[in-house]
Structures are given as C-alpha cells and as structure tokens.
Amino acid sequence: MTTVPYLLVRHKIKDFDKWKLIFDNYSTIREAGGSKGGLLFRNTDDPSEIVAIFKWDTIENARKFAESENLKKRMQVAGITEKPDIYILEEVERVV
C-alpha cells in the first residue's frame, strides 16, 4: 500500500468569520506546499474549536508546511487563541 500523508490541525479561534477569511485566502499557499485538499470541521459543543484534515503529497512537504514561520504568523493574525495541535499522519487503512 502506498503511504498517504495527512496533516491534522486542531485549534481554537476568537472569531470564525475573520479566521475563515484568512484560512480561505491561504488556500493557494497550502496547494503550492503540497496540499491535495481536505476537510474542515467545527466542534458542535464548542464552535471556537476547529479541526482541519488535509491530504498531502509527501510527508516531508506536510512537515515543512506545518513547521513554517509563515503558517505560525498567519495563525496569529487569524486569531488562534491557543497553541494548535498539529499532527503529521499516514493512512494505515480505510474502515467502515
């Protein structure tokens, strides 16, 4: 099986609309860094908590993106209220 890398990010935000605008405007940078798209979730019990899961082209590119100073600065501007949890994952199996 070919390894499929993912980047999972969980963080809390102050203002969803402000955060979403910045998140959406960052899509071309994600794509240039190797993102193949993903899913965005919002906690139903705590709407300030966001989880994003992105499929990535390589583990190395996912790690490079996650560790970039540009991403850290962008998160600050977007109103992230705490240190985000960021995980580099590889798909092991699809289950039902």
Image (spheres, rainbow, N blue to C red):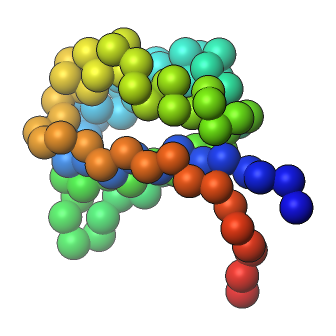
Which one is in front, 46 or 68?
Answer: 68
Where residue 49 sits, quadrant-wise, is bottom left
- Left or right of residue 91: residue 41: left
- Left or right of residue 47: residue 31: right
Find residue 11 and report its horizontal and vertical position in percent.
Answer: 26, 47
Which one is in front, 46 or 73?
Answer: 73
Residue drawn at x 64%, y 38% as measured from the top left: 59
- Left or right of residue 81: residue 1: right
Residue drawn at x 55%, y 16% as measured from the top left: 29
Total labels: the figure holds 0
In the picture shown, does residue 10 fall above or below 67? Answer: below
- Left or right of residue 18: residue 91: right
In the picture shown, does residue 1 fall above or below 77? Answer: below
Q: Residue lying furthest right in this view? A: 1
Residue drawn at x 61%, y 27% as measured from the top left: 61
Find residue 39 and report its horizontal and vertical position in percent.
Answer: 56, 51
Where residue 80 sits, quadrant-wise, is top left
Find residue 25 and report its horizontal and vertical position in percent.
Answer: 46, 18
In the picture shown, does residue 93 fall above or below 60? Answer: below
Q: Is residue 48 visible?
A: yes
Which one is in front, 30 or 78?
Answer: 30
Find residue 18 and report its horizontal and vertical position in percent.
Answer: 25, 28
Residue drawn at x 72%, y 86% as measured from the top left: 96
In the picture shown, does residue 55 fall above or below 71? Answer: below
Q: Residue lying furthest bottom in this view? A: 96
